[in-house]
Amino acid sequence: MQFEEFEFFSSDAPAAPVAAPREAASPIVRLQYLVDNTPAIIYCTVPSGDFKMTFVSNNAYNVLGYRPEEMVADPNFWFDHIHPDDAPSIFSSLALVFSEGQRAYEYRFRVSDGSYLWMHDTLRLIRDEQGAPLEVIGSLTDITGRKTMEEALQAKGEEQQSLIGKLQEAHDQLLQSEKMASIGQLAAGIAHEINNPVGFVNSNMGSLQGYVTTLFGVIEEYEQTLAAQKGAPELAARMAQIREGADLAFLKEDVNALVRESMDGLKRVRDIVQSLKDFSHVGETEWQIADLHHGIDSTLNIVSNEIKYKATVEKQYGVLPPVKCLASQLNQVFMNLLVNAGHAIKERGTITIRTGCANDWVWIEVGDTGCGIAPENLNRIFEPFFTTKPVGSGTGLGLSLSYGIITKHGGKFEVASEVGKGTRFTIRLPVNPPASLSPAGT
C-alpha cells in the first residue's frame, strides 16, 4: 500500500469511530475502522525541529478529549501539552530520532479536562527512496494504569524497606542493650572482685605510710640523742658512716614518694571501677534525673586509654540543670563521639567538650581537630552500617544507634565538618522530655 493511499484520512473526519465495515467493504474502509478503534493514537508530524502534527487518528478524542483537527491546526500542540517536568528530557534528545531512526518516551500529557495521563510514545522516522526524511510517524498509548500500579508497588516497596530498616534498627538497639547489660554485670563483678583487695591494700598503704613516718622519726631521735652524748665520738662516727652508706636522706624522700604514688594509683583504680559502674548504671531501665557532666566525666575515664596518646581534652562546661533521661544510654552516645573524635585525629590534636543551656534545652558539643568528614558522606553518617573505616575497624552502627537514642529523648543531633580541619557534633536535649517519650511515674 503506497503512502498516498492515506490521504483520505482528513482532519475533518468525525470524532466517533466509524461503524464496523461489512466484509465486502474496501481495504481502505477496513483500515479506517481499525485505526479509529485501536487503543493507540496514530499521528504523523513533519520531519523538522518543530514536529508539527500533520495527521491524528480519530480515536484521539476518545483518549485525550481533543478533536484531531484541533491538534493538527496548532503547530505547537504536542510541545505545549507535555508536562513541564517531563519536557526537558524529551526535547534534549528528540533530534536523535534523525540519527537513530526511532525513539521511545514515557511522559505525562495534559488532556482536555486539565489532568494528565501517562503516555508511551514511539516515534519512527520515514525516509523516501533517496533517503531524505519524509515524515515522522508516532504511536501514543495510554499507560496511566500501568504507571499507577508501578507507583503503588514502588511505594509499597519503600514502605517495606522502611519497615525492614526499623526492624533492623530495633534489632541492633536490642543487641546493643544486651551488650550494655552484659557490661553492667561485668562492672558489678569487677567492682566486687577488685574493691575488696583494693580496700585492704589501701588500708595497708595508709598504715605503712604511718609506720614509715614513725620509723624515720625514731631514727632522727636516735641521732639527736647520740649527738647530745659528747663521750661517744666513735659511736657517732659509726652512725654517720651507716647513715651515709644507706643513703638515708634519699631513702626518706623516696619512700615517702613511693607511698604517695601508690596511694594515687589505688585511688585511680577505685575511680576507674566507680566510673565503669556509673557508666553502665547496672540494672537501670527507667528514666531518672541525672547530672550530664558526671556522665561525661565517667565516660572520659572509660575511654581515656583510647584518646590520651593522641589528643588533649579541653572541657568548657557551662551550667547544666539536672536532666530527665536514660543516663546509661546517653553515656553510650558520649563514648561513641569521644572514641570517633580520637580515631579522627591521626597524630596529635585536641578534643573540645562544651556544654550549655538555653530555653529549657541543654546542649553538649564534642569537637575535634581531626581529618573531617567528606561532604558526600556527611548525609550518610547516621545510616546503619555506613562507615568510612577500614574493614574490620568499625561496624557502622555507633552513630546510627546514637541518633536513635537522642531521638528517643526528643532531642536533636547536629554535625558540622570540614575536611582537614575537624568535626563538631552537637546534641540538644530537652530538660524535661515530652510525656509521650518519658513514661509517667518514671
Image: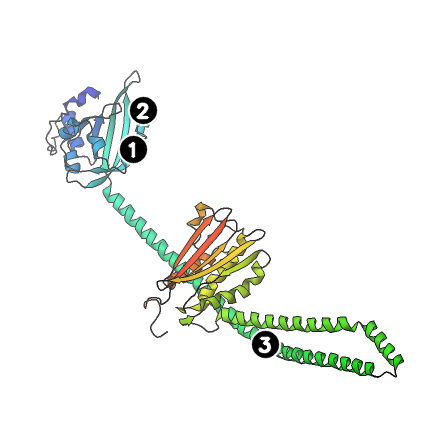
From the viewer's perspective, is the residue at label 1 or at label 2 nearer? 1
Kind of residue at disc 2? Phe
Q: Which mark is on residue 404?
A: none
Kind of residue at disc 1? Ile
Residue 299 image position (x, y, % from top left): 51, 65
Name the N-terminal-most of marks 3 and 2: 2
Q: Quadrant of the N terminus?
A: top left
Identify the element where label 3 is drawn: helix
Residue 43 image position (x, y, % from top left): 21, 29
Which residue is labeled 2 in the image? Answer: 98
Residue 127 image position (x, y, % from top left): 28, 20
Q: Residue furthest top?
A: 130
**Is the residue under label 2 in contact with that under label 1 (CB below 8 Å)?**
no
**Which one is in front, 3 or 394?**
394
Which residue is labeled 1 in the image? Answer: 90
**Relative to 36, residue 5 above or below:** above
